[in-house]
Image: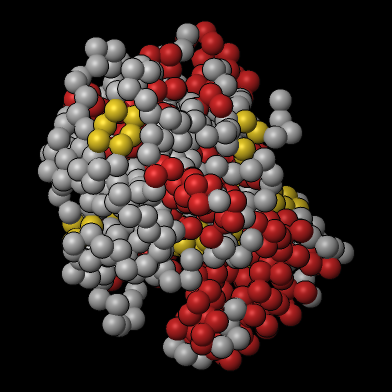
Amino acid sequence: MGSRWEKMKLVIRNKMCVHSPKTKDHSISTLSLNSATTFSGDASGHHSSGPHLSKSGSKSSKGICAICLNTMKPGHGHAIFTAECSHTFHFQCILSNVKHGNQICPVCRANWKEVPFQKPSSNVPVDMPRINRISSQRLRRVPSQPANNGGGRQISSLPNVPEPDIFDDDESLDQQTNHDENEVETNHNVINTMEIRTYPEVSAVSKSASHDNFALLIHLKAPKGNITESSSPSGQKSRAPIDLVTVLDVSGSMAGTKLVLLKRAMCFVIQNLCSSDRLSVIAFSSTARRIFPLQRMTDTGRQLALQAVNSLSPNGGTNIAEGLRKGAKVFVDRRFKNPVGSIILLSDGKDTYAVNNSRPHSVTDYRSLVPNSIQRNNGVGLHIPVHAFGFGVDHDATAMHSIAEISAGTFSFIEAENAIQDAFAQCIGGLLSVVVQELQVEVVCVHPKLQFSSVKAGSYQTNLSANARTASIKVGDLYAEEEKDFLVTVNVPVDKSSSEMSLLVVRSFYRDPMTKEMMGSEKTSEVKIQRPSIARGQVVSIEVDRQRNRLRAAEAMAEARVKAERGDLSGAVSVLENCHKALSETVSAKAGDRLCVALSAELKEMQERMANQRVYEQSGRAYVLSGLSSHSWQRATARGDSTESTSRVQAYQTPSMVDMVTRSQTFILGPPQPGNLFTPAKSFQYRGRN
């Protein structure tokens, strides 16, 4: 019994795999916790809590490698490494374990001062980025460099891989992205057609009547594109490849389940990038380090990225500003450039370095967190949005929402820890399907007496000419089949001279991310209304009414948030309740419009999350801000406490987002492999898919 118990303890403590069972249940009770599980200790390395095995180990564990759990016998073709704490391992097993800076014994958790060294391999891929060639050559006996976690104890922190001063070591782009010209032209003619539709508030206005604030809806829909399975060989030719930088919080509060689930979510992201996509990983706590350079996700790149993610261990404070600075630096210093670029930021805490958390904040107060190089409207032109994810109930929702707004990204609230993978999946489902870039919409008044009275475009930048007869909206990137709706109002004058009046002309300009050519809409969309002597039986357009309701709900959410921040929760609830009642009386709501149903459900949930100050602090603020982010950009964000709640109120998911979330919910990691945290890239699969 004693021998079996010792072996069980070794398996629990040292199994080098985050492994999910073949089930849709994402419960963390089935996950094996490895480097994400921390054990508090003092500077001498003694642990004060958690399971503990003595340095000497048990008799039954001698002769067994604690990493692969296979026997170790001299002369069987495996070199044996004996650590300074007296524990022994297969040399190749421990080499993989320490490759990215882990200097903690898998058995007794002692901090090693020296790690094994392997001479440079002659088969290192020639096209591997310089940082990887360097790191593979520098796995020698390096003194540990413990980092102070802010609590007096020194714990080995971020991976101890050398970091260059300039991040110009990005891997060159996949030459296969240079398509045959005839193929590109053929694809362009078929799939790259922007759809523009316009809807007047009513179809007719009497000749002798004027109509102030007459509403007109401009509806845009991106082309479907030819988005295929991102993991298929043809995936790299069917969509615009991406440069993705993930900026991940590994502070002390991420210890345990959170970090395990983050690693698992990152595994999903890595497996869904194709060989034309490039990924870089930044980890931050009290400081920040680039633990993985901007490298293509080939089979080799995936495996190296997984190893880098596996090396993460939690400790220290939360320096969001430094993490974003390193993330932006990857884009600024890179030598090559994929068509699409984005940052994914995840944090579960408040910035403890750049933000004074003792007073209320506005977006301006958080501008210092975002590097100038990626702030929108700064003239630099990088156009790198930060999609921010607030993880758990203790994160700074105001800061994360502000970071997203400043960079033209979105803010998502991950309340339930096991929803992180689905949240990432929804985000990359969009990023991996960009079919339109630098989209700008121009709206021009046709009738000589017509002028704009308002242009409602949420967070998108609008410009109105001095004479108020021309308006433009900068939209930017669109995902495949993504839809945008903008509401403009004009003052319709009396006109007895004609039975028909032309109001507006709408045209669009955008860049094709595959050909990099600037395109114009094939035809302009003109809005006309009838001018009969008497206009009878006019019915308000459901399309226009639906968007009015969306804007009305978003305004109510913003107003309720202001009241809640001032401590007036009853006033905030009243605003939401009044908006809910007003929506229920509209034409589209009475017609059972799906968007109106979703808005009503969202308003009700926000009221519940403003029941008292404690509930608002824990989840209400983040839920409202993620909703505001979604409506202002008309883009899907994760929010709520489950994927069911998210789908119930989600109005902006694109087909590619839905598909990627489905993949996430049926994602299965293969069986553990000796010495590896994750199954190699070729082993992953999707249940229920061919």
User: Where is 630 relative to 290, above or below?
Assistant: below
Give the side of residue 509 with respect to residue 377, left or right. right
The quadrant where residue 49 appears: bottom left
User: Where is 288 relative to 240, above or below?
Assistant: below
Residue 275 percent coordinates (x, y)? 44, 23
Residue occupying image coordinates x 29% and y 42%: 87
Q: Name the image colouring.
A: secondary structure
Residue occupying image coordinates x 45% and y 83%: 565
Residue occupying image coordinates x 43% and y 17%: 177
Residue 42 percent coordinates (x, y)? 23, 66
Q: Is residue 110 visible?
A: yes
Give the side of residue 527 with respect to residue 467, left or right. right
Residue 352 percent coordinates (x, y)? 26, 69
User: Where is 493 relative to 471, above or below?
Assistant: below
Residue occupying image coordinates x 38% and y 18%: 76
Residue 508 percent coordinates (x, y)? 52, 39
User: Where is 287 relative to 164, above or below?
Assistant: below
Instruction: Pick the residue in front: 338 or 157.
Output: 157
Instruction: Pick the residue in front: 453 or 113.
Output: 113
Q: Is residue 576 visible?
A: no
Number of callouts in the render? 0
Instruction: Pick the residue in front: 84 or 63.
Output: 63
Give the side of residue 4 with respect to residue 390, left or right. right
